Each structure stands twice: as C-alpha cells, then as structure tokens.
Amino acid sequence: MSPAIRPISYQQFEKFLKYIGCEFVHQRGSHRKWRRSDLKRPVIFPADELPVFIIQNNLRVLGLSTQQYLAILEEL
C-alpha cells in the first residue's frame, strides 16, 4: 500500500514551503499567502490544520506530485 497524504498542521506545511523556496507574503484573516517567482498563482491556506484537499490543490499550484511531496516531508 502506498503512503497517502494526511492532514497536517499549517506550521508543518510552511516548513515544507520554505524548503522548496517559497516565501511568506501576508496573512488576511486566517488565510496565509505564500509565493515563489516561478508560480502563476500564490499558495493560500488557512492557519489551521490542513485537510487533504487543500494540500492537494496547493500541490497542483506548485506542480508537485504526491510522491515528491511525501519524499520532502520525510526529509524535514
């Protein structure tokens, strides 16, 4: 059985974003915005535990596969 994406804290997701070269822009309400120069859209998520669908949507924005994401999390 292959490993699956699980909900994680927004702090852990931010460590992942820093690792892949993103930088924090600002927070409006509970939503935090991160960017990277090569992305067409910013990465946005709530300052709360992140459900799987938000992680998957942001991986699409980042152009990363589930396997790449899980491998990076292992390193952190």
Image: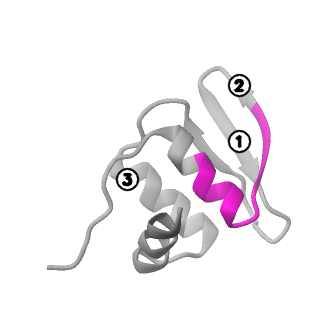
Which residue, as the protein is rendered here, is positioned at the far right? 37
The disc, 1 or 3, on the residue closer to the chain's N-terminal end is: 1
Which element is circle 3 on?
helix
Find the magenta span and give its range: 14-26
Binning the other alpha carbons within 10 Å of mark 3 as few (below 14), some (14 to 19) or many (20 upward) gives few
Identified at 27% across, 67% down, the residue is 4
Residue 10 inside the magenta-drawn segment: no
Q: Give amino acid for label 1.
A: Lys
Identify the residue under disc 2: 28
Q: Is residue 47 above or below residue 39?
A: above
Q: For the residues marked 3 and 2, what is the alpha-carbon distance in whole angstroms?
A: 21 Å
The disc, 3 or 2, on the residue closer to the chain's N-terminal end is: 2
Q: Is residue 48 above or below residue 72?
A: above
Identified at 48% across, 59% down, the residue is 57
The disc, 1 or 2, on the residue closer to the chain's N-terminal end is: 2
Q: Are marks 1 and 3 in contact (CB under 8 Å)?
A: no
Q: In the visual, does 35 lie left or right of 2?
A: right
Binning the other alpha carbons within 10 Å of mark 2 as few (below 14), some (14 to 19) or many (20 upward) gives few
Q: For the residues marked 1 and 3, what is the alpha-carbon distance in whole angstroms?
A: 17 Å
In the depicted view, which residue is nearer to us: 67 or 72? 72
Binning the other alpha carbons within 10 Å of mark 1 as few (below 14), some (14 to 19) or many (20 upward) gives some
Identified at 59% across, 24% down, the residue is 30
x and y percentages locating residue 28 in the rendered image: 71, 25
Identify the residue under disc 3: 53
Q: Give amino acid for label 2.
A: Arg
Identify the residue under disc 1: 33
Which residue, as the protein is rendered here, is positioned at the far top? 29
Q: Are marks 1 and 2 in contact (CB under 8 Å)?
A: yes
Q: In the visual, does 50 lie left or right of 21?
A: left
x and y percentages locating residue 55 in the rendered image: 45, 55
Q: Give amino acid for label 3.
A: Phe
Which element is circle 2 on?
strand
